[in-house]
Amino acid sequence: MGMSNNAKRRLALAAILGLAFGLRLAYVSCLADETVFASVDARDYQILATNLLQRGVFSLQTDPPYLPDGIGTPLYPAFLALAAAMGCAFARNEALILCTRSAG
């Protein structure tokens, strides 16, 4: 028995989305170094994640005293800190996250 039209459409859509994600991932992984993703936001997220990971404080300060920052939300920097704790470089994290966010 063959696949229904709905199943064929779903399979085609999944293939297109998978290809789009794969192309983005390949492109971003070729470009991901410290200079490509050196935007102000990326730098701030990196500082927040580093401070969370190394000092246990949510702060944009790069020198003591590390005063807590109440402007941003801690979820994304916490995710970056977790990925960094597992051995991922910050530029690779940014690249993968940007690739994933743009695919959706």
Image (cartoon, rainbow, N blue to C red):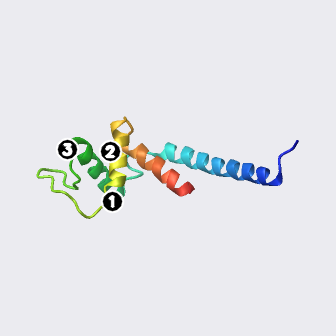
- Percent of width and height locating residue 32: 45, 45
State the residue position of label 2.
Answer: 81
Tell me where residue 85 sits by quadrant: top left
Residue located farthest toward the left when viewing the structure as drawn: 65
Instruction: Residue at 39% x, 45% y: name it.
Output: 91
Residue type at mark 1 is Val
Instruction: Return the mark for residue 70.
Output: none
> Total marks drawn?
3
Residue type at mark 2 is Ala
Separation of marks 3 and 1 at Cα, in angstroms: 22 Å
Q: Marks 2 and 3: CB-CB under 8 Å?
A: no
- Percent of width and height locating residue 71: 26, 64
Instruction: Return the mark for residue 40.
Output: 1
Observer-nearest of 67 and 37? 67
Left or right of 85, for residue 6: right
Task: Bin the neighbour count of mark 1 within 10 Å (Cα to Cα): few under 14, some 14-19, many 20 and up.
Answer: few
Q: Nearer the viewer, mark 3 or mark 1?
A: 3
Q: Secondary structure at mark 3?
A: helix
Separation of marks 1 and 2 at Cα, in angstroms: 18 Å
Residue type at mark 3 is Arg
Observer-nearest of 46 and 40? 46
State the residue position of label 3.
Answer: 55
Q: Secondary structure at mark 2?
A: helix
Separation of marks 2 and 3 at Cα, in angstroms: 11 Å
For marks 2 and 3 on the same chain, the one whose residue lies earlier in the sequence:
3
Left or right of 24, for residue 3: right
Instruction: Residue at 12% x, 50% y: name it.
Output: 64
Q: Nearer the viewer, mark 1 or mark 2?
A: 2
Residue located farthest toward the bottom when viewing the structure as drawn: 71
For marks 3 and 1 on the same chain, the one whose residue lies earlier in the sequence:
1
For marks 1 and 2 on the same chain, the one whose residue lies earlier in the sequence:
1
- Percent of width and height locating residue 18: 64, 47
